[in-house]
Image (spheres, grey):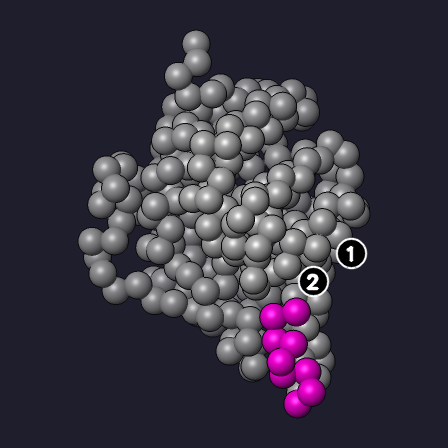
Amino acid sequence: MLDTYLLFRPRHHQDGSSTPTAVGLQYDDVFLASDGVQGRLHGWFVPAKSDITLLWFHGSGSDISQHLGGIEALHHELGVNLFIFDYRGYGHSDGTVTEDGTYRDAEAALRYLLARQDVNPTGIVFYGCSLGSGVAVEMATRHAAYAVLLESPFTNIKAAAMKRYSWLLSWFPIGAIVQSRYDSLAKIKNVHSPLMIVHGDRDEEVPIDLGRQLFEAGNEPKEFYAVTGAGHNDTYSVGGKSYYRQLRRFLASCAGHHGQGRSANYKVPGSV
Protein backbone atom coordinates (compact mmCIF):
# COMPACT_ATOMS: atom_id res chain seq x y z
CA MET A 1 0.00 0.00 0.00
CA LEU A 2 1.31 3.44 -0.93
CA ASP A 3 0.33 4.74 2.51
CA THR A 4 3.38 2.95 3.90
CA TYR A 5 5.63 5.05 1.69
CA LEU A 6 3.76 8.37 1.58
CA LEU A 7 2.32 8.47 5.10
CA PHE A 8 3.78 5.83 7.40
CA ARG A 9 7.54 5.69 7.60
CA PRO A 10 8.21 2.84 10.03
CA ARG A 11 11.57 3.00 11.76
CA HIS A 12 13.18 0.16 13.69
CA HIS A 13 15.64 1.03 16.42
CA GLN A 14 18.38 -1.51 16.95
CA ASP A 15 20.58 0.13 19.57
CA GLY A 16 19.78 -1.46 22.93
CA SER A 17 21.39 1.47 24.75
CA SER A 18 18.80 3.94 23.40
CA THR A 19 16.47 3.73 26.38
CA PRO A 20 15.38 6.19 29.10
CA THR A 21 18.31 4.94 31.19
CA ALA A 22 20.56 6.83 28.75
CA VAL A 23 19.03 10.10 29.98
CA GLY A 24 19.00 9.09 33.64
CA LEU A 25 15.37 7.97 33.93
CA GLN A 26 13.95 4.84 35.50
CA TYR A 27 11.36 3.11 33.35
CA ASP A 28 9.34 -0.05 32.83
CA ASP A 29 9.97 -1.90 29.58
CA VAL A 30 6.46 -2.78 28.43
CA PHE A 31 5.19 -5.35 25.93
CA LEU A 32 1.51 -5.33 24.99
CA ALA A 33 -0.90 -7.50 23.06
CA SER A 34 -2.95 -5.60 20.47
CA ASP A 35 -5.87 -6.77 18.32
CA GLY A 36 -4.76 -8.03 14.93
CA VAL A 37 -1.04 -8.26 15.73
CA GLN A 38 0.65 -11.63 15.79
CA GLY A 39 3.22 -10.58 18.32
CA ARG A 40 3.55 -7.67 20.69
CA LEU A 41 3.83 -3.91 20.87
CA HIS A 42 6.70 -2.29 22.71
CA GLY A 43 6.68 0.80 24.92
CA TRP A 44 8.21 2.58 27.91
CA PHE A 45 6.45 3.74 31.06
CA VAL A 46 8.40 6.45 32.87
CA PRO A 47 6.95 6.98 36.38
CA ALA A 48 6.62 10.17 38.39
CA LYS A 49 4.79 11.05 41.57
CA SER A 50 1.86 12.60 39.74
CA ASP A 51 -1.85 12.18 39.17
CA ILE A 52 -1.25 12.99 35.50
CA THR A 53 -0.03 10.57 32.83
CA LEU A 54 0.80 11.54 29.24
CA LEU A 55 -0.21 8.81 26.80
CA TRP A 56 2.08 9.75 23.92
CA PHE A 57 1.16 8.99 20.30
CA HIS A 58 4.23 9.78 18.20
CA GLY A 59 4.52 10.79 14.56
CA SER A 60 4.94 8.77 11.39
CA GLY A 61 8.69 9.11 10.88
CA SER A 62 10.06 8.10 14.26
CA ASP A 63 10.10 5.37 16.87
CA ILE A 64 10.26 5.78 20.63
CA SER A 65 14.07 5.69 20.76
CA GLN A 66 14.16 8.98 18.86
CA HIS A 67 12.19 10.77 21.57
CA LEU A 68 14.59 10.39 24.48
CA GLY A 69 15.26 14.13 24.60
CA GLY A 70 11.56 14.89 24.66
CA ILE A 71 10.88 12.22 27.27
CA GLU A 72 13.56 13.64 29.54
CA ALA A 73 12.38 17.23 29.10
CA LEU A 74 8.67 16.54 29.57
CA HIS A 75 9.33 14.35 32.61
CA HIS A 76 11.52 17.01 34.20
CA GLU A 77 9.57 20.13 33.23
CA LEU A 78 6.03 18.79 33.74
CA GLY A 79 6.70 16.21 36.45
CA VAL A 80 4.17 13.72 35.04
CA ASN A 81 4.13 10.01 34.23
CA LEU A 82 4.83 9.22 30.58
CA PHE A 83 3.85 6.24 28.48
CA ILE A 84 5.16 6.16 24.94
CA PHE A 85 4.82 3.13 22.68
CA ASP A 86 5.49 2.12 19.09
CA TYR A 87 2.63 1.37 16.72
CA ARG A 88 2.67 -1.98 14.97
CA GLY A 89 5.57 -2.13 12.53
CA TYR A 90 7.58 0.56 14.34
CA GLY A 91 10.58 0.09 16.61
CA HIS A 92 10.42 -3.30 18.33
CA SER A 93 6.66 -3.67 17.77
CA ASP A 94 5.47 -6.49 15.54
CA GLY A 95 2.99 -6.28 12.68
CA THR A 96 2.31 -3.92 9.78
CA VAL A 97 1.02 -0.41 10.34
CA THR A 98 -2.40 0.77 9.12
CA GLU A 99 -4.75 3.54 10.23
CA ASP A 100 -7.11 1.12 11.96
CA GLY A 101 -4.10 -0.65 13.45
CA THR A 102 -2.87 2.54 15.11
CA TYR A 103 -6.29 2.94 16.76
CA ARG A 104 -6.22 -0.66 18.00
CA ASP A 105 -2.72 -0.14 19.34
CA ALA A 106 -3.81 3.04 21.11
CA GLU A 107 -6.64 1.11 22.77
CA ALA A 108 -4.14 -1.52 23.95
CA ALA A 109 -1.93 1.23 25.40
CA LEU A 110 -4.87 2.79 27.24
CA ARG A 111 -5.95 -0.60 28.65
CA TYR A 112 -2.43 -1.05 29.96
CA LEU A 113 -2.47 2.31 31.74
CA LEU A 114 -5.91 1.71 33.24
CA ALA A 115 -4.68 -1.59 34.68
CA ARG A 116 -1.80 0.06 36.54
CA GLN A 117 -2.42 0.79 40.20
CA ASP A 118 -0.12 3.82 40.11
CA VAL A 119 -2.05 5.57 37.31
CA ASN A 120 -5.04 7.75 38.12
CA PRO A 121 -7.63 6.84 35.45
CA THR A 122 -9.04 10.39 35.48
CA GLY A 123 -5.61 11.92 34.87
CA ILE A 124 -4.72 10.52 31.45
CA VAL A 125 -3.75 13.07 28.79
CA PHE A 126 -3.93 12.07 25.14
CA TYR A 127 -0.77 13.62 23.71
CA GLY A 128 -0.58 13.35 19.93
CA CYS A 129 2.22 14.66 17.73
CA SER A 130 1.81 15.07 13.96
CA LEU A 131 0.36 11.73 12.74
CA GLY A 132 -0.24 10.88 16.40
CA SER A 133 -2.63 13.83 16.64
CA GLY A 134 -5.03 11.85 14.47
CA VAL A 135 -4.75 8.90 16.85
CA ALA A 136 -5.26 11.15 19.87
CA VAL A 137 -8.40 12.74 18.41
CA GLU A 138 -9.89 9.34 17.59
CA MET A 139 -9.20 8.15 21.13
CA ALA A 140 -10.75 11.31 22.57
CA THR A 141 -13.99 10.60 20.69
CA ARG A 142 -14.12 7.21 22.43
CA HIS A 143 -12.86 8.04 25.92
CA ALA A 144 -12.98 11.01 28.27
CA ALA A 145 -9.48 12.33 28.97
CA TYR A 146 -8.04 14.73 31.52
CA ALA A 147 -6.95 16.72 28.48
CA VAL A 148 -6.10 16.41 24.79
CA LEU A 149 -2.78 17.95 23.79
CA LEU A 150 -2.02 18.08 20.06
CA GLU A 151 1.28 19.17 18.53
CA SER A 152 1.57 20.05 14.84
CA PRO A 153 -1.81 18.49 14.01
CA PHE A 154 -3.57 18.35 10.65
CA THR A 155 -7.25 18.44 9.69
CA ASN A 156 -7.16 15.20 7.71
CA ILE A 157 -4.66 13.23 5.67
CA LYS A 158 -5.96 14.44 2.31
CA ALA A 159 -5.36 18.08 3.25
CA ALA A 160 -1.97 17.32 4.80
CA ALA A 161 -0.86 15.23 1.82
CA MET A 162 -1.89 17.89 -0.68
CA LYS A 163 0.20 20.43 1.26
CA ARG A 164 3.19 18.18 1.75
CA TYR A 165 3.27 16.62 -1.72
CA SER A 166 2.02 19.60 -3.71
CA TRP A 167 4.85 19.13 -6.18
CA LEU A 168 3.36 15.74 -7.14
CA LEU A 169 -0.17 16.99 -7.79
CA SER A 170 0.46 17.52 -11.49
CA TRP A 171 1.52 13.89 -11.80
CA PHE A 172 -0.62 11.92 -9.34
CA PRO A 173 -3.94 12.46 -7.52
CA ILE A 174 -2.33 12.25 -4.06
CA GLY A 175 -5.61 12.67 -2.19
CA ALA A 176 -7.05 9.63 -3.95
CA ILE A 177 -3.90 7.50 -3.68
CA VAL A 178 -3.52 7.82 0.09
CA GLN A 179 -6.20 5.58 1.58
CA SER A 180 -5.79 6.53 5.23
CA ARG A 181 -8.05 9.33 6.43
CA TYR A 182 -7.32 10.36 10.04
CA ASP A 183 -10.18 12.82 9.60
CA SER A 184 -9.68 14.85 12.77
CA LEU A 185 -11.65 17.80 11.41
CA ALA A 186 -14.81 15.68 11.20
CA LYS A 187 -14.19 14.08 14.60
CA ILE A 188 -13.10 17.04 16.73
CA LYS A 189 -16.70 18.13 17.36
CA ASN A 190 -17.14 14.90 19.31
CA VAL A 191 -14.22 15.66 21.63
CA HIS A 192 -15.35 17.23 24.91
CA SER A 193 -12.17 17.03 26.97
CA PRO A 194 -10.08 20.22 27.41
CA LEU A 195 -8.10 20.80 24.23
CA MET A 196 -4.77 22.49 23.58
CA ILE A 197 -3.16 22.75 20.15
CA VAL A 198 0.52 23.68 19.82
CA HIS A 199 1.86 24.57 16.37
CA GLY A 200 5.04 26.10 15.02
CA ASP A 201 4.40 29.10 12.77
CA ARG A 202 7.13 27.89 10.40
CA ASP A 203 5.98 24.27 10.18
CA GLU A 204 7.18 23.07 6.79
CA GLU A 205 5.33 19.73 6.84
CA VAL A 206 1.93 20.58 8.32
CA PRO A 207 1.27 24.33 7.87
CA ILE A 208 -0.09 26.14 10.92
CA ASP A 209 -3.32 27.01 9.09
CA LEU A 210 -4.34 23.34 9.30
CA GLY A 211 -3.81 23.42 13.07
CA ARG A 212 -5.88 26.61 13.31
CA GLN A 213 -8.72 25.08 11.26
CA LEU A 214 -8.81 22.12 13.62
CA PHE A 215 -8.79 24.44 16.63
CA GLU A 216 -11.68 26.52 15.30
CA ALA A 217 -13.79 23.37 14.89
CA GLY A 218 -13.06 22.17 18.45
CA ASN A 219 -15.20 22.61 21.54
CA GLU A 220 -14.48 24.76 24.56
CA PRO A 221 -12.48 24.74 26.74
CA LYS A 222 -9.67 25.04 24.22
CA GLU A 223 -6.40 26.90 23.70
CA PHE A 224 -4.10 27.53 20.75
CA TYR A 225 -0.41 28.17 21.28
CA ALA A 226 1.62 29.28 18.26
CA VAL A 227 5.36 28.83 18.79
CA THR A 228 7.11 31.65 16.95
CA GLY A 229 9.96 30.43 14.76
CA ALA A 230 9.27 26.71 15.29
CA GLY A 231 9.02 24.12 12.54
CA HIS A 232 7.41 20.69 12.62
CA ASN A 233 9.56 18.87 15.17
CA ASP A 234 11.16 21.58 17.30
CA THR A 235 8.32 23.31 19.15
CA TYR A 236 9.76 22.37 22.56
CA SER A 237 13.32 23.44 21.79
CA VAL A 238 12.36 26.69 20.06
CA GLY A 239 9.65 27.49 22.59
CA GLY A 240 11.99 26.82 25.51
CA LYS A 241 10.83 27.83 28.99
CA SER A 242 7.76 29.56 27.60
CA TYR A 243 6.66 26.29 25.95
CA TYR A 244 6.77 24.34 29.21
CA ARG A 245 5.19 27.20 31.15
CA GLN A 246 2.24 27.18 28.75
CA LEU A 247 1.83 23.40 29.08
CA ARG A 248 1.99 23.53 32.88
CA ARG A 249 -0.58 26.30 33.00
CA PHE A 250 -2.90 24.39 30.66
CA LEU A 251 -2.66 21.15 32.64
CA ALA A 252 -3.37 23.01 35.87
CA SER A 253 -6.44 24.61 34.30
CA CYS A 254 -7.92 21.18 33.49
CA ALA A 255 -8.20 20.06 37.11
CA GLY A 256 -11.71 19.06 38.15
CA HIS A 257 -13.07 18.86 34.58
CA HIS A 258 -14.07 15.21 35.14
CA GLY A 259 -15.81 14.21 38.33
CA GLN A 260 -15.79 10.42 38.18
CA GLY A 261 -13.48 8.39 40.38
CA ARG A 262 -10.53 9.98 42.19
CA SER A 263 -10.38 13.41 40.61
CA ALA A 264 -6.96 14.09 39.13
CA ASN A 265 -5.06 17.21 40.11
CA TYR A 266 -1.99 18.54 38.33
CA LYS A 267 0.72 19.90 40.58
CA VAL A 268 3.49 22.00 39.07
CA PRO A 269 6.92 20.44 39.81
CA GLY A 270 8.41 22.02 42.90
CA SER A 271 5.08 23.30 44.21
CA VAL A 272 3.79 22.32 47.65
Q: Secondary structure at mark 1?
A: helix
Q: Residue at x 51, y 28 (%)?
A: 245
- Dot 2 amino acid type: Asn
The residue pinned by badge 2 equals 156
- Dot 1 amino acid type: Ala
Q: Position of residue 137 (x, y in %)?
A: 65, 50
The residue pinned by badge 1 equals 186
Give how far apart the Cα atoms at labels 1 and 2 are: 8 Å
On whether residue 169 falls in the magenta region, the answer is: yes
On screen, residue 262 versus residue 43, left or right, reads right
Q: Which mark is residue 256?
A: none
Q: Residue at x 33, y 48 (%)?
A: 68
Single out the residue that lies furthest toward the left.
Answer: 17
Quadrant position of the N terminus in the picture: bottom right
Q: Nearer the viewer, residue 95 or 11?
A: 11
User: Can you say whether 197 is above or below 242 in the image?
Assistant: below
Q: Position of residue 272 (x, y in %)?
A: 43, 9
Single out the residue that lies furthest toward the top.
Answer: 272
Q: Callout 2 environment at 10 Å: few (<14), some (14 to 19), or many (20+)?
A: many
Q: Nearer the viewer, residue 174 or 52?
A: 174
